Image (cartoon, rainbow, N blue to C red):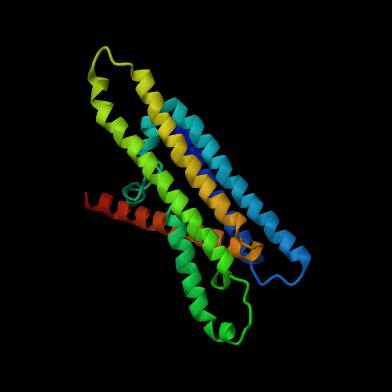
Amino acid sequence: MTSFTNFYETWFEQLHHLVHQLVAAHRPPTTPDHNYDLEHLVNKVMSHYTEYYQVKSVAAESDVLSVFAAPWATTLERSLHWMAGWRPTTVFHLIYSESSILFESHIIDILRGLRTGDLGDLSPSQFRRVSELQCETVREENGITAEFSEWQDSASELMNVSANVSEKIGRLVSVLRKADDLRLRTIQRVVELLTPQQAVEFLIAAAELQFGVRAWGVNHDRQRENIQ
């Protein structure tokens, strides 16, 4: 897992740089070229996430148990994990939260009929599509959780000399890949239903949440080490 841990540290640092680019470019688009620039940055971030899950899949094939243990994550991050990563439905809590905050901050403009174009200005059609996607994601999450529970129920068989360990480990790899595929697809589908400006705001908010949790986790782990 040392190689993947090293990859993650580099990948995480690169994510910081990409978010800095998103923040620098983020402003209400005034020209078609600006929209194009935002789309280009969004695609760069999505490619970055795709790379993460591709490398993680290779690491899982090599040592899936270590991937579940997630030695590159802090204690806090691991406590929040669902299938060795963030829970896909977290995306929808983030969307609704950001939309509500921005809506309230622009309520006067909205009442005047002015469009802000940000996440606080989601259309009825966008809200409907977000809700539909949330329901689909919840169903897939529940299915993966049930499959993992079945695997756990049979895990005791690994102690049996005659057990087919490779087959059971293979099933665990399959469960993890389904979870990671759902994570990536959820972000992709949410980004697709947003405008470039809204997608930039969403990706910034998602990354800042990730940065914040990791920073809290690092601080907590350091304090615990000092106490010990």
- Which of the 4 quarters of the picture holds residue 153? top left
Vertical comparison of 17 with 166: above or below: below
Quarter of the figure that contains the N terminus? top left
Does the image show residue 83? Answer: no
The x, y position of residue 6, in whole percent, is 49, 38
Q: Name the residue: 62% across, 46% down.
A: 47
In the rendered view, would you say 6 is above or below 41?
Answer: above
Q: Residue at x 43, y 61 (%)?
A: 93
How many marks can you see? 0
Q: Quadrant of residue 151?
A: top left
Residue 86 point in image, percent of width and height: 41, 49
Viewer-side residue, 53 vs 99:
99
Residue 141 x %, y %: 40, 45
Q: Is residue 131 visible?
A: yes
Left of 224 or right of it: where is 22? right
Where residue 179 appears, as percent x and y from the top left, is 44, 40
User: Is residue 204 shown above or below 82?
Assistant: below
Taking 54 as reference, is 44 left or right?
right
Residue lying farthest top? 162
